[in-house]
Amino acid sequence: MFTGARARFVELNDRGEQAIGVWATSADPSTTAIFGEVGYDFVLIDGEHGALGIRDILGHIRAAQATGTVAVVRILRADPSLVQQVADLGADAILVPKIETAEQAAACFAATQYRPGGRGFCPMVPAAGWTNGAWAEHADRANRELLFIPLIETLAGVENFERIVKTEGVDFAFYGLGDLAQDMGTDMATGRDRLIEIWQDLHDKADRHGVRLGAPGGFGFDGTSFVTIGGDLNFVRSTSAEHLANARGAR
């Protein structure tokens, strides 16, 4: 049976496992359908760097729903109106880039909540099943289950991390080492040791506040609650190159 992002991630963590996910940057939702079919715990639909319009994001969300995997959507920027838009499409979790202050976090979280000053009421959206017939149940479930995940990927975000994770609604966060390395004036290889030190500091602070921290896999980050291990078009490229090399070598 399908469970939402919060329940899925917590269940896996309580069993001593990480939630394992993958990026979707292709406009074709077939990639998300494939990831769901093979058993990824979540797909991270990239509305920031992927070539995805709002209809493409909706297609990916529907593919995730059809295959029982969690649909996490990264939006373009920390804009509460964009948070609400993908929430209405039916996203299970929303990853918001470059969160740097507690105030930003609070505003984005509010856009996930049906309450005064928060998410707008509209039953004519996919998330509500295009009906207000069971609105109270929908609103209650959405307020409990929909995740806001701040992406910590700047020096300001690192500096303000403890204030961010103390904000209402921040139960999960994601460590973005690529942009952070760039903000530090280095890169992921040259700055690896420092990036791991920062991760450990953030992980310790997150743990003190009961926040689960995720990160890209393969970089030596211990204690991750959820990880990403690549992306659809990266997989196409690497597999294509491998098959071509094998075919040429077999001549």
Image: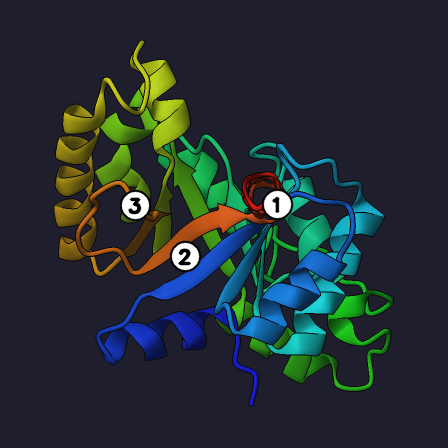
Secondary element under disc 1, as helix, strand or loop, is helix
Of callouts 1 and 3, the N-terminal one? 3
Of callouts 1 and 2, the N-terminal one? 2
Residue 114 placement (x, y as % from top left): 62, 63
Mark in the foreground, 2 or 3: 3
Residue 205 placement (x, y as % from top left): 15, 46
Mark pair 1, 3: CA separation: 29 Å
Of 1 and 167, nearer the camera is 1
How packed is label 2: few (under 14 Cα within 10 Å), some, or many (20 or more)?
many
Q: Evaluate whether residue 60 shows in this view.
A: yes
Mark in the foreground, 1 or 3: 1
Give the residue at mark 2: 169
User: What type is the residue that disc 1 sits on?
Assistant: Ala
How packed is label 1: few (under 14 Cα within 10 Å), some, or many (20 or more)?
few
Mark pair 2, 3: CA separation: 28 Å
Give the residue at mark 1: 247
Residue 41 placement (x, y as % from top left): 48, 69
Secondary element under disc 3, as helix, strand or loop, is loop
Q: Residue at x 78, y 57 (%)?
A: 58
Q: Residue at x 19, y 56 (%)?
A: 223
User: What type is the residue that disc 3 sits on?
Assistant: Gly
How packed is label 3: few (under 14 Cα within 10 Å), some, or many (20 or more)?
few
Q: Evaluate whether residue 90 shows in this view.
A: no
> Residue 218 — which label?
3
Of 143 and 237, nearer the camera is 237
Mark pair 1, 2: CA separation: 52 Å
Numbered circles on residues, count = 3
User: What type is the residue that disc 2 sits on?
Assistant: Gly
Q: Relative to residue 233, is residue 29 drawn left or right?
A: right
